[in-house]
Image (cartoon, grey):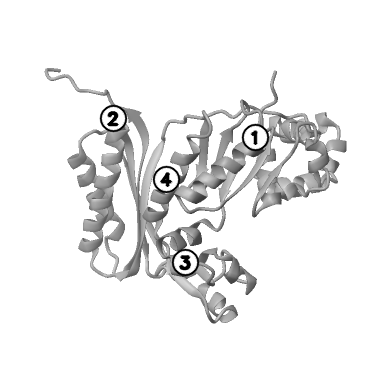
Amino acid sequence: MKTPRILHVDGDNYFVTCEEILSPTLRGRAVVVAGGRRQDGIVLSASRRAKAFGVKSGMACFRARQLCAELVVCPARPEVYRQISARMFAVLNRFSPLVVPVSIDEGFLDLSAEADGAARWHELSAAVSREVGLALSGGLANSRWASKLATDAGKPGFLEIAAGREKEFLSPRDLRELSGIGEHRADALAALGARKFSDVAALPSMLLRQRFGIWGQKLWLFANGEWPEELLAEVRPRTMISRQKTFSFDVRDYCRVLQFGTVELKKLLAQLRREQLAPRELGVTVRFADFSEASAKHRFRVAQERDEIICAMFAAKFRECVSGQTKSVRQLRVALWNLSPQPAQRLLFP
């Protein structure tokens, strides 16, 4: 059986690079893309020049400005970033029979059929740079876990873990670098004396199986370089759809909030109609200016297909949330779940 070769790709400073594509005069400058309530609260992405001043993702923008007087702050434009992402993945799809996106700027490609995976990487990264304007980092290995670690180790740029050298690459690395290991699991492994992959490889496999189940057995095999895996496209049915809006200023007029929520709800229903799904449960959450919240939900007798009934129930539940309130609204959330498939076409005469 041929060893799987999985390529992981990740956009470098993705949000900032998108802004540079749209405004080439930003290239080479200290730029951040900001999010938050007024689109200037938290740094979401920083250019290399901004990072040289100590600016990093998750930092408050006012602190970033203190560190870098020349900082340019760009409000986040999610819809634009999604459009550029679609162009990037359209290019990637030309280079592999299977591409699995995992985020707006990140995905895995199956290069198992390629005689030279590294050469294929250079072709596709050059194509994305030329046609889209994005710079990519990449990692090539025999599994998703390993290729993601290779990308992180080689960023910015490319790193390949040669077949049979996985254990050698992993041994000195900290376990916290592995995607999927949270604080709880990391602490539990540390209690067993395992802080690096070499520590895991030296533990009895059954101990990890007993402590962590199948995941522990997989981790032991991975640390010993014995976990090659084929790339699979997982298709999971949608179970919930939701929308959330934090207003740029506190809204005192509940009718305006209700009107806005109804428009957002209709967008969700249109999406479900395209996916031929119908919701059975609806939920509304209103967050007020003092960060207190009120929630209400409703369960229909059967999966509801009629928009007017769902919208009427949304209005009733929203009024339930704001009944007796005098505080302004900061945020509105609406969710539909317990989704059921609709027939592709209704009968003309049921």
In primary-sequence order, the first of circles 3 and 4 is 3
Which one is closest to the eye, mark 3 or mark 2?
Answer: 3
Asked if marks 3 and 4 touch (Cβ < 8 Å), the reply is no
Residue in the foreground of this view, choosing between 274 and 312: 274
In primary-sequence order, the first of circles 3 and 1 is 3
Which residue is labeled 1 in the image? Answer: 117
Q: Compared to 208, does 62 lie above or below? A: below
Asked if marks 3 and 1 touch (Cβ < 8 Å), the reply is no
Q: CA distance from mark 1 to mark 4?
A: 22 Å
Q: CA distance from mark 2 to mark 1?
A: 51 Å
The number of numbered discs placed on residues in the rendered structure image is: 4
Q: CA distance from mark 3 to mark 4?
A: 23 Å
Badge 4: few (under 14), some or many (20 or more) residues near its Cα, within 10 Å? Answer: some
Report the amino acid beneath label 1. Gly
Residue in the foreground of this view, choosing between 203 and 252: 203
Residue in view at x 82 percent, y 45 percent: 194
Which residue is labeled 2 in the image? Answer: 302
**Is 281 left, or right, of 163 in this rendering?**
left
Q: CA distance from mark 3 to mark 2?
A: 43 Å
Which residue is labeled 4 in the image? Answer: 87
